[in-house]
Amino acid sequence: MHNSVLLALWGGLAFILYTVVNYVREERRHRRNAEQLGCEPAYSTVSKWDPLGLRVASTFMAEFKNFRFVPFYKQRMDGIWAKEGKIIPTMFQVVGTTPIIVTVEPKNVQAILATKFKDFGLGQFRNKLFNPLLGTGIFATDGEQWAHARAMLRPQFARDQISDLDLEETHIQHLLQHLPVKGDGWTDVTNIQPLFFSLTLDSATEFLFGQSTNSQLFNLPNHASKTANDPTIFKDFPLAFDNAQRITSSAFPLGETFYPLKFGKEFRAQVKICHDFIDHFVQQALTKEKTPAGTTSSGKQKFVFLDAVVESTRDPIELRNHMINILLAGRDTTASTLSWVFLELVRNPAIYAKLRAVVLDNFGSYANPRNITFESLKACSYLQCILQESLRLYPVVPNDSRVALRDTCLPQGGGPDGSKPTYVRKGTAVEYPFYIMSRRKDIWGEDADVFRPERFDGRKSGWEYVPFNGGPRICIGQQFALTEAAYVIVRLLQRFEACEGVGNSWEPVEKGGYGYVRWDLGLTGCPADGVKIRFKEAVDS
Ligand code: HEM
């Protein structure tokens, strides 16, 4: 045999030997670590016929495509619990060769998000995936970079700054232009979901940049005359932002090796429109004289988020990164929450009537509103219960995850009864699907799937209720979102005394559904088929 072939053979053998020895050494090290920590293996869903989880991955992809992934994932876990005759909150699975620990155990969620915060991060893959659109902003970084972004952004969410309800009222008025009342006292049947997305985009851009996209006005039939002077960039941005997010989330299932396949010419064009839009304001903020941005009707100086951040950094790329991340966080989340709230309100006329009575009692009528403030909205218990119950049944981030940044363990899930700690190797993904945890019957009762806002009356929630996450990385926009959503609900219920849902389908099991509504799951989740609704004008409005 030729010398070079022999050399290659020996080289190959040496490599295989090295890999095997290394593997055995690593396995031993992990076993020792796990023993020292008192860990035992978690329940495994891995089938011997599908050890790499290829079939699992293809099922997941199909469910994603059909907008059923969220309810399907719960159905799958329910099925395993039914088969085993007990609740198994923590499981090990392999999906398309990726090992994943899934947990709906509150103690584990607390460990991931708080007590073992430093052991878990967003991980390299999520950060790389988000980077083209979001740069190194708060949603796409870990460690020092994240801490720096959070320290800069958090102070801007002080109560005074987020409670500018004058700003919100302008955008509500624009929304109502899309809901004209006909001669019979009713509006046309309207899909209210896109209206909520336009409203939150308009209010978020005004809060962040001091200028609104006014996308609601653009979408009115006679928009040309009203908006002829606005730059095209305002018109193109909303769709480009949606598209760029959709492509980013569709790249996720391709995994770390293949995700760039989705980031072609089309994606880059959409991202460019988004970045140009943000850069337009950044340049304005960097060059403008330091003048007050006007005052609100209550005489307060109007707060502009970007101007406040410019006080801390003048780097245009860093500013773009911060602003696009906050815009993404602040816009779809609140619009989706409002959509879910109204999907349940149209289904439950008695709850609509009860909420409306509370609204009129606390805040007056549409024409004569009174005392609608950050504090009074927060103090209105039934209104807050409605929001909390909606976020329980329809958390807009239904399935969050982290990656172990070092070898570590979770306090529960190991051993036959799941009461022992579970070992988590560095690099392992850990999912905590809040959508499933928030519907656990052993935690929430037999009616866990039912929309019953009263369950939150006087309830003090712990780690079983984390729609905004918890710990050092808890959502910084929680109060902003709840105030905006509450205000929109109050004004709509003042204006309309009743509503009817038309053709909003809860997919029946016999039609291949799971008895739940379909989910459009991008970076956040909203009803896949919109919220079709007609409203009846209130006599007192
Ligand atoms: C109902 C509405 C909202 C919900 C349910 C929600 C939920 C969440 C969740 C679950 C996270 C954690 C994501 C993760 O770490 O994987 C998060 C983070 C965040 N949210 Fe929200 N959010 C909402 C509204 C908002 C709004 C209106 C803003 C800003 C205007 C905002 C700003 C942020 C930011 C900046 C983070 C990142 C925090 C960090 O990593 O330190 N959110 N949100």
Image (cartoon, grey):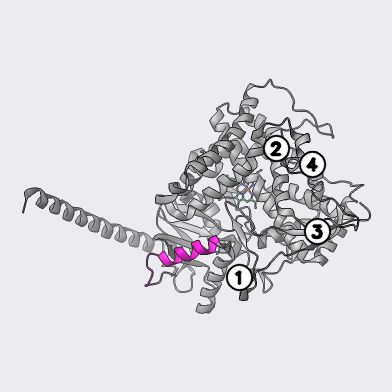
Direction top: furthest residue: 289
Residue 173 picture location, percent across and down: 82, 44
CA distance separating discs 2 and 4: 18 Å
The circle on residue 513 is: 1
Direction right: furthest residue: 540
First of labels 4, 1 by sequence position = 4
Residue 304 versus residue 111 in the image, above or below = above
The circle on residue 534 is: 3
Alpha-carbon neighbours of circle 4 within 10 Å: few (<14), some, or many (≥20)?
Answer: some
* Residue beneath disc 2: 213
Across the whole image, how many numbered discs are drawn on residues? 4
Q: Which kind of residue does numbered mark 4 sit on? A: Leu
* Residue beneath disc 4: 165
Report if residue 476 is visible in the image: no
Identity of the residue drawn at 69% across and 54% down: 337
First of labels 2, 4 by sequence position = 4
Q: Nearer the viewer, residue 440 or 244?
A: 244
CA distance separating discs 4 and 3: 26 Å
Residue 58 versus residue 203 in the image, above or below = below
